[in-house]
Image (cartoon, grey):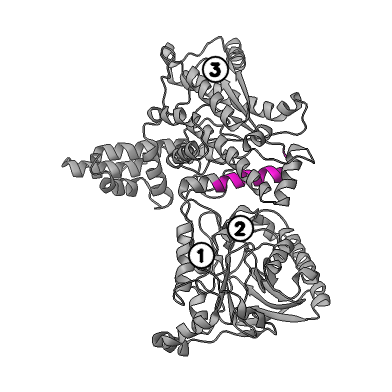
Amino acid sequence: MRGHLGWPELCAHSAGLSSPDCIWKLLLKPRGGWYLSLVPSGIEIAKHRGARYRLGPELEICGYGCWDHYYESDTLLHSLQVLAALLESPVTQDIICDVGMPVMHRNVRYNCRVIFLNRKILLIRPKMALANEGNYRELRWFTPWSRSRQTEEYFLPRMLQDLTKQETVPFGDAVLSTQDTCIGSEVCEELWTPHSPHVDMGLDGVEIFTNASGSHHMLRKAHARVDLVTMATTKEVLTATLDLEDIRSYRAEISSRNLAASRVSPYPRVKVDFALSCHEDLLEPVSEPIEWKYHSPAEEISLGPACWLWDFLRRSRQAGFFLPLSGGVDSAATACLVYSMCRQVCEAVKRGNPEVLADVRTIVNQPSYTPQDPRELCGRVLTTCYMASENSSRETCDRARELAQQIGSHHIGLSIDPAVKALVGIFSLVTGTSPRFAVHGGSGRENLALQNVQARVRMVVAYLFAQLSLWSRGAPGGLLVLGSANVDESLLGYLTKYDCSSADINPIGGISKTDLRAFVQLCMERFQLSALQSILAAPATAELEPLAHGRVSQTDEEDMGMTYAELSVFGRLRKVAKTGPYSMFCKLLNMWKDTCSPRQVADKVKRFFSKYSMNRHKMTTLTPAYHAESYSPDDNRFDLRPFLYNTRWPWQFRCIENQVLQLEGRPQQELDGVD
């Protein structure tokens, strides 16, 4: 038997078949919107390709990212209304449709798959394992279905009863039995559990497993996804195929598998008077095995955050982006992401994508415009600005201007010195004192305040130009301000609160400095952006302190007291490995034993946690960022921790000190009396 499954938006797996293109399409589509119009078009695409079963993303009807809107009865009501419209639509006829939406059953809210065919709901299948770590809070809004292989009657609301002529439908853990095969459903997190449902489903004769997912993109996550899908299906066959006779022959040959199958508890089966195959399929060739293309982290950055930028731009209905371009790696990487976005938009238009063409015409406010050159499009949607001060070097100015020329952005050069002097002048007028930089004899407080006022002026200037620069050119609309603080700087708090790290969105806020440098290197080679070579070669610097003989006297790593590579290690140990100061010290003793003494390790750990806790309050105002790294310190949704600490960490640091003293063979300190 040969049949057709549709994956227009999401990977389903049967006998080892999975599509990388489909997963990328899901990841690049908005999941935070309401009542997506994409559902009917996705079904139409699936039917056009000959599919007989169409699987959509998790919670696709309302959007996965509704979060606390799930509490609202409106969300449930409108989801039911969209479901009614789908049931009634001729597009959904003669194809099994599997959509995701929240459903209230006996006053309990569930994350469900609703499977229907020809105006009849076949099964409502609630999710049994909920994701509740990292970015996920599913247990906050939903309850897992805990009754394995059991169903109940779900009484349809009247709006659905009138359409389907059904009073009740099965609700629970069941499978579909069509005329020619048996189909089982998993939902996202269930595939990641130690004993996934497909294991017992397969033993009970289920031949096709579907898995609807809302899993977000994260760097280096594709390997884990593919491995899970492969493990779920290579137990069945060795190559990708849709010929289910091959699966049946293969299964029947394995005696140990047959013995386990004879003991498994059966799943309730919903009989479906429908077939995925037809007589004409005999001449259809079987699918070729799909070779998964793994992207390097640098390639993933060029794709994922770039599409995220496009999604924000088209949905916000703004006319483009405004980016403070400093001539450093971070802002250069952000500029390259916009340029990569423009390249992908031009490629999509060239392939004949009508939605992208309509969106870009709306953004540039020209109904007849068709983008062909990424540089030309970049000039329309990206304004870059080098904001010089008396502490800026000629080199960074030249690097910013050269990169802007190569990507085609509309570039502005200006000086913030008049604004900075005016603000400092107000302070001097009121207090009768004039703060000085450290190199001019000022204190540490004066030095830091003079750096911060420059950084904050840049944020104010950025928003002024974002609102009015298009107006000054006679063009309509405003610009989204882009931030460019990387995840390592946010982790340590190496940024000024309400400086240019404060923006509308930040495409690199979840990406490490190491990965950003690799991405910039990729752009230099792949996009022929030679200006990036000098940017990569230059030391990272904020340029907020006076120059020494015209040269930069301040570097980021010297200011931080640690390298970006060390910061990445600290970040992963703190968030991923769940270590506090003492356990981090213990782990690093072995990790860094060839390069650091116990005393040096202790000093580095103490310095990190002191600065981290001192600056943790900055994370509460962090600009919304593309989540790409597992150790992101984003306090808004991902990393929920206090923002007021005892920055001395007296007990923890004393424990570290005692361990160092023990290793050095010296007397330990008493812990009594530590506050």
Residue type at numbered disc 2: Leu
Element class at badge 3: loop
User: Which residue in the structure is indicated by mark 2?
Assistant: 26
Q: Which residues are magenta?
A: 303-318
Q: Quadrant of residue 166?
A: bottom right
Query: Are the two marked residues, 2 and 1, in contact with CB atoms closer than 8 angstroms?
Result: no
Front-lying residue, 429 or 335: 335
Q: Nearer the viewer, mark 2 or mark 1?
A: 1
Q: Residue at x 71, y 26 (%)?
A: 469
Q: Which residue is mark 3?
A: 389
Tell me the kind of residue under disc 1: Ile
Q: How far apart are labels 2 and 3 at the CA level?
A: 44 Å
- The type of residue carrying mark 3 is Ser
Q: Which corner quadrant holds the C terminus?
A: top left
Query: In the rendered view, does 562 fall on the left or right side of 482?
Result: left
Give the residue at x 84% y 76%. 162
Find residue 17 and report its horizontal and vertical position in percent: 53, 69
